[in-house]
Image (tube, rainbow, N blue to C red):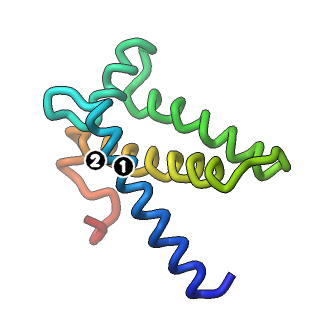
Amino acid sequence: MTHEEFAKLFDAVVKNERATLVNKAIEYSRQGDRLWNFRAGAGLTGLSPEQTLWGYLCKHLASIRDICNGVPASRKMIREKIGDARNYLILLEGLLLDQPQSKKRTLHPGAD
C-alpha cells in the first residue's frame, strides 16, 4: 500500500467512524448523556460503565481475532468491526475522563 493509498484509507475510515458515532448517539444517548448506554448497561450487569463497555468491545475484538486467524470476511465487515472497536475505545476514553477523579487530575502530565 502506498502512502497515498493509506492516506485515502485513513480519511475514509475516519469519515465512516465519525458518521457511525453521530448516528449511534441518537440511538444510545438519553437526557443529554452521550455515554448513557454504558451506564444503563452497568445497571443491568452490576459492573461499572467502563467494564460494561469493555464487554461490548470484546465482542468486536473476538471477531477481529477470528478474521486475523483466517475466518473469511468482506471488506465491509473488516471496516465495520475495526471501526466499531476504534469507536468503543474513543467512548471508553470519554467514560474514563468523565469520572469525577479524572476531572481533578491529568492522566499524564502535559497530555490534556
Measured as percent of width and height from the top left, residue 74 is found at 71, 51
Measured as percent of width and height from the top left, residue 89 is found at 45, 49
Quadrant position of residue 75: bottom right
Answer with left or right where residue 96 lies relative to residue 86.
Answer: left
Measured as percent of width and height from the top left, residue 35 is found at 29, 35
Query: Residue 81 versus residue 44: which sits nearer the camera?
Result: 81
Residue drawn at x 77%, y 43% as measured from the top left: 66
Instruction: Tell me the crowding category of disc 2: few under 14, some 14 to 19, or many 20 or more residues within 10 angstroms, Cα based.
Output: some
Quadrant position of residue 98: top left
Residue drawn at x 65%, y 52% as measured from the top left: 78
Query: Residue 23 versus residue 96: which sits nearer the camera?
Result: 23
Measured as percent of width and height from the top left, residue 10 is found at 50, 71
* Above or below: residue 38 compared with residue 21: above
Q: Would you name the residue on which mark 2 appears? A: 97
**Please, which residue is most extreme toward the right here?**
70
Dot 1 falls on a residue whose secondary structure is helix
Identify residue type, mark 1.
Glu
Q: Is disc 2 in contact with disc 1, using a CB cutoff of under 8 Å? A: yes
Where the N terminus falls, by quadrant? Answer: bottom right
Q: Would you name the residue on which mark 1 appears? A: 93
Residue drawn at x 39%, y 25% as measured from the top left: 48
Dot 2 falls on a residue whose secondary structure is helix
Instruction: Tell me the crowding category of disc 1: few under 14, some 14 to 19, or many 20 or more residues within 10 angstroms, Cα based.
Output: few
**Please, which residue is most extreme toward the bottom here?**
3
Identify residue type, mark 2.
Leu
**Please, which residue is most extreme toward the left here?**
31
Mark 2 to mark 1: distance in Å?
6 Å
